[in-house]
Image (cartoon, grey):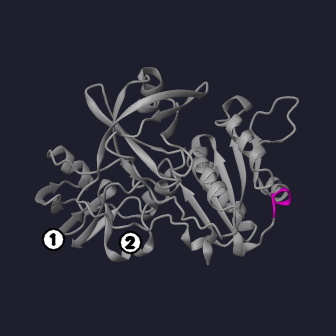
Amino acid sequence: MAFSLFKKSEKKEESHSGPHYYALKVKNIVHETKDAISIVFEQPVSGKIAYRSGQFLTLIVPIQGKDVRRAYSLCSSPFVDSDLVVSVKRVDNGLMSNWLPDNLKAGSTLKVMEPMGQFTTDYQKERKRHLIMFAGGSGITPMMSLIKSLLTQEPDSIVSLIYCNRNIESIIFKEELTRLETKYEGRLHVIQVLDEAPMNWQGYSGLLNHEMLTKLFERIPNWGMEKSTYLMCGPEGMMKNVETLLDQHHIPKENIFKESFVSPTIAKEQKKETTPAAENKAREVTIRYDGHEYKVLVQPNRAILETALDAGIDLPYSCQSGLCTACRGKALSGKVKLDEEEGLSQSERDEGYVLTCVGHPLTDDVVIEIG
């Protein structure tokens, strides 16, 4: 069916042996809210960087004498915007999320890894579908990219956005969403939900629950299961809640896609209780990357990527949480245990793909090819 074109983890093989890096100049910094900014990057003079709506950029910044990497979703659309734009929201004790708004200025240059990510879809002008989005806080960023692309590339498709925030002051892209809703009247439906609503608030307030979701579904167009796709991006607790609510409304799991910004701690705690302790033995791993072959001895409870980086091997990576898949490689032999598998599809796991940032060798014959 048409919605199978929405890809979460289906990777395309790249023709190059490793990711490209760019030095991008900051064109402008837009203050979206008191704790969120949008960074507008100029396209490089060597040629425009191609990307797909819903993908992310990995920013690499030297902080306190060490290169720090963080992935931020693009909120720009390749069909609408000439520049590359990412949004950053401050996080308590967040190293990069606080450094960027405090130090970055127009004219600055940042090292950036090429766009990656599979929270994307293809567009066809004749297609007619309904994307129902649940966003929380900075989870609006990939949704904004997808919204702008869908509205311009599929004139018969529509979007319903349910956007949850703490208060009215924390709504990122508030004016932009209002402008788009007016311009594409009848095709973009925005429903704001606030934890702390002001006295004159006419919308929804409080946490999403079964009763609220039932009322929300009554407000958005009903195009049936065959033409409806559900997307979510936001805090882990919100997404778990939405998943439960969608299940109660009998929404098929194959119609639901999500993008995670943080490693799912709830699932990790459950895994700790059910997974036996890893073997207490160091294992040698062979890594093939960029035309070279490296051998590293991975100690118990150490990840393959971590060990390789400590050995001075410059492997690609970004989130180091098993979500972004920038560190993906194929295990040609041996067995590898992953702490987190959410970034990979079942077919990828069946083909032997692993994530080195959360991978631990279980045998002595592990050979991983990257790129």
What residue type is disc 2 on?
Glu
Q: In this view, does 90 lie above or below 278?
A: above
Q: Is mark 1 on a helix, strand or loop?
A: loop
Q: In which quarter of the image is residue 367?
A: bottom left
Please provide the residue range marked out in magenta: 217-221
**x, y percent for residue 257:** 58, 63
Q: Residue 348 carries which label?
A: 2
Residue 142 relative to residue 105: left or right: right
Q: Is residue 126 left or right of residue 15?
A: right
Q: Are marks 1 and 2 in contact (CB under 8 Å)?
A: no
- Mark 1–mark 2 distance (CA, rounded to whole Å): 20 Å
Please tell me in which quadrant of the rendered image residue 284 appears.
Answer: bottom left
User: Between residues 205 and 83, which one lies in front from this camera angle?
Assistant: 83
Q: Horizontal placement of 114 versus 188: left or right? A: left
* Quarter of the rendering occupied by the N terminus: bottom right
Residue 174: within the magenta? no
Residue at 78% from the left image edge and 69% from the top image edge: 223
